[in-house]
Amino acid sequence: MRPLVVIGDALLDVDVEGTADRLCPEAPVPVVDVAREWRRPGGAGLAAVLAARTAAQVTLVTALADDAAGASLTRLLSRDVEIARMPLSGATVAKRRVRAGGQSLLRMDSGDGLAAESPLPGPVRDAIRSAGAILVADYGRGVAQHPEVRRLLTTTTAPVVWDPHPRGSSPLPGSRLVTPNVAEARHFAPGHAEPEELAKLLRAEWSADALAVTAGSRGAVFADEAGVSTIPVPRGIRALDTCGAGDRFASAAAAALLDGASTREAVTVAVTAAARFVAAGGAAAVSTCDTREAPVSVDGTAFGLAESVRRDGGRLVATGGCFDLLHPGHLSLLRQARALGDALIVCLNSDESVRGLKGAGRPIVPARDRARMLLELSSVDAVAVFDEPSPVRVLRRLRPDIWVKGGDYAGTHLPERDHVGEVVLVPLVGGYSTTKLINH
């Protein structure tokens, strides 16, 4: 399958968390004792990472600088997506939010970077031309405004989803779907307020095949050649408009179009995906903490997540294994598993369990580090470590809707089958195994 290509401006989001229980002696402002920093890709970078939850192959076309923020952003992105890099004039944009006691105190923005107007590098042109579907996440810093990018977008046969922003440019005519939220739609159509009116008006103004105005708990107001209608949020899911909801909506719609869905079907999928994303914590759930320790105990993480997903009417997915030396086969299985539901829990064999299954020389990597590496993947939401040869006991407590195994288990008896909703076998990437890596 051809890749989903995300085009737009990536930035670095940093949440600084701490406590504030005293005032500064020099001025009546709080002193924040920093406990941890959470980092995540923002802008088109967040859209690309979220797209990787439902698309097997994602390429991000963006502009990055050779500075500390750019290096941090590159590391975060490279875990999930391929990067087709354009040069950036100036410094990488970073947004730092300082929080204490659950309250935001201030935001500090840095970086003035804009996409350079130099000719596109060959890998960028190749990425756009190879796209099976395209998502433009235009945050107004030059990537989507680049003349050659726009020319390539006008000649592509891939469906284009355009997520506009007030600082960006107008979507190119002929986009398959344009996805402003209500506030953005009102910015582009001053004097008009109702989502139904905005959807109809902007679709005509931008000559789009279809337009969806995302409206938080209302779902999306959808306009195409057949008229205007509302696609609601499914019952049982709490949906509020929060950070990253629009990126999740647009990325899910683009992934659905990549899979062959009609535009209306893609918007319906996107409404559900965005609502579940918000219910699961929004963009904060995509963040990486600089100081966190990966838990080996499952009680505080995996079981709580399982209960939360069930409470919100979501689908819980689980898979299991030793994951001793992570390789592309593991990453493919985990990504496919995560795409089947709203959260993925990995049942991880403990060191004792691995030794019992593989022999005295294993594992190569201890359980704490294996869990830490798995938790760094955006496809993994929690890890449950178990000591037994089989994950049956932990599955009795997790009660996942779907248990995922590799296709090599076809035709074999799985004792886990009696403790899960259904078993799904996914295709494997050939040629990879931990044993082969060790013996190589």
Image (cartoon, helix red, strand yellow):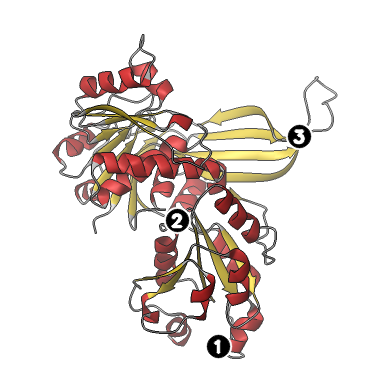
Q: Which image quarter is the N terminus in?
A: bottom left
Q: Which residue is mark 2?
A: 341
Q: Residue furthest bottom?
A: 359
SS class, disc 2: loop
Q: Please report the residue visible at 61 percent of the width from the left and 33 percent of the height from the top.
A: 97
Q: For the residues carrying marks 2 and 1, which lies nearer the camera in this image?
A: 2
Query: Distance between the Cα atoms at labels 2 and 1?
Result: 31 Å
Q: Position of residue 425 (x, y in %)?
A: 38, 72
Q: Amino acid at mark 3?
A: Val
Q: Please report the residue visible at 23 percent of the width from the left and 38 percent of the height from the top.
A: 119
Q: How many marks?
A: 3
Answer with left or right where residue 37 lies relative to residue 141: right
Answer with left or right where residue 104 lies relative to residue 46: right
SS class, disc 3: loop
Q: Amino acid at mark 2?
A: Gly
Q: Which residue is mark 1?
A: 358
Q: Amino acid at mark 1?
A: Lys
Q: Nearer the viewer, residue 324 or 78?
A: 324
Marks 3 and 2, the one that precedes in the sequence = 3
Q: Which residue is mark 3?
A: 32
Q: Position of residue 278 (x, y in %)?
A: 52, 40
Answer with left or right where residue 36 lies relative to residue 136: right
